[in-house]
């Protein structure tokens, strides 16, 4: 179930990545060809870019495709690397994600209470949805780390 949740989030991130390219291309084309500044489109690219990172992080971690700097674990061998990843998850990932959740919940909650929109006059109205990705990010990352750790202990 956890892997399916992260897989769905990664598929949404793929769509968001296509939106980033489309929004940015259209905004640049409008600016350079027609002299039109479409701030809502540029803001949409920023929103979609945030969604790409926030939604794909848990899947990337669960699949072992994240960037790892194996300064010490290169010397440990395969079983030592797995053990180092498990220890890293417990000592670093869990406190980090719990901290992100603890700090972001009041922030996101306040944004939802006011249905916060963009500060720009022609900006997008759903800033509260973008801020919600902080909570989703932390949960998906925590679940992705748990999934990767669980898989490495099974074999």
Image (cartoon, rainbow, N blue to C red):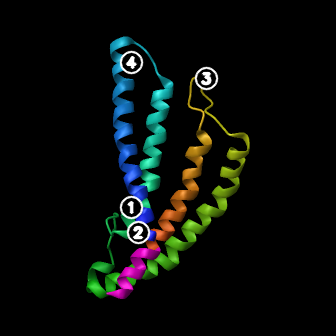
Residue sitting nearer the eye, 112 or 68? 112
**Cα separation between marks 4 and 2:** 41 Å
Q: In this picture, is 23 found above or below 17?
A: above
For label 1, the residue is 7
What residue range appears in magenta? 146-155
The earlier-in-sequence mark between 3 and 1 is: 1
Which sits earlier in the primary sequence, circle 4 or circle 1? 1
> Residues at badges 3 and 2 in contact (C-beta under 8 Å)?
no
Q: Secondary structure at mark 1?
A: helix
Residue 52, given in percent of the width and then of the height, sits at 41, 49
User: Residue at 62% across / 43% down in the picture?
Assistant: 128
Residue 31's x, y, as percent? 39, 18
Q: Give whichever of discs 4 and 2 has the lower sequence position.
A: 2
Label 2 sits on a secondary structure element that is helix
Examine the image and state in which quarter residue 26 appears. Answer: top left
- 70 left or right, relative to 9: left
Callout 4: helix, strand or loop?
A: helix
Which of labels 3 and 1 is toward the front? Answer: 1
- Which comes sooner in the sequence, label 3 or label 4? 4
Circles 2 and 1, Cβ within 8 Å, touching? The answer is yes
Q: From mark 2 to mark 1, how far is it between C-alphas? A: 6 Å
**Residue beneath label 4, please?**
31
Crowding at dot 1, Cα within 10 Å, few <14 / some 14-19 / many 20+, comes out as some
């Amino acid at each position: 179930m956890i892997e399916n949740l992260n897989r769905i989030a990664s598929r949404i991130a793929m769509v968001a990545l296509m939106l980033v390219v489309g929004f940015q291309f259209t905004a640049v084309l409008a600016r350079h060809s027609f002299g039109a500044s479409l701030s809502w489109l540029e803001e949409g690219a920023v929103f979609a870019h945030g969604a790409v990172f926030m939604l794909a992080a848990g899947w990337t971690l669960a699949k072992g495709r994240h960037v790892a700097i194996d300064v010490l674990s290169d010397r440990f061998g395969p079983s030592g690397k797995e053990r180092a990843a498990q220890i890293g998850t417990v000592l670093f990932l869990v406190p980090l994600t719990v901290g992100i959740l603890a700090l972001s919940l009041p922030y996101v909650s306040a944004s939802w209470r006011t249905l916060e929109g963009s500060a720009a006059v022609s900006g997008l109205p759903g800033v509260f949805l973008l801020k919600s990705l902080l909570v989703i990010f932390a949960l998906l990352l925590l679940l992705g780390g748990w999934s990767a750790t669980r898989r490495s202990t099974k074999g």
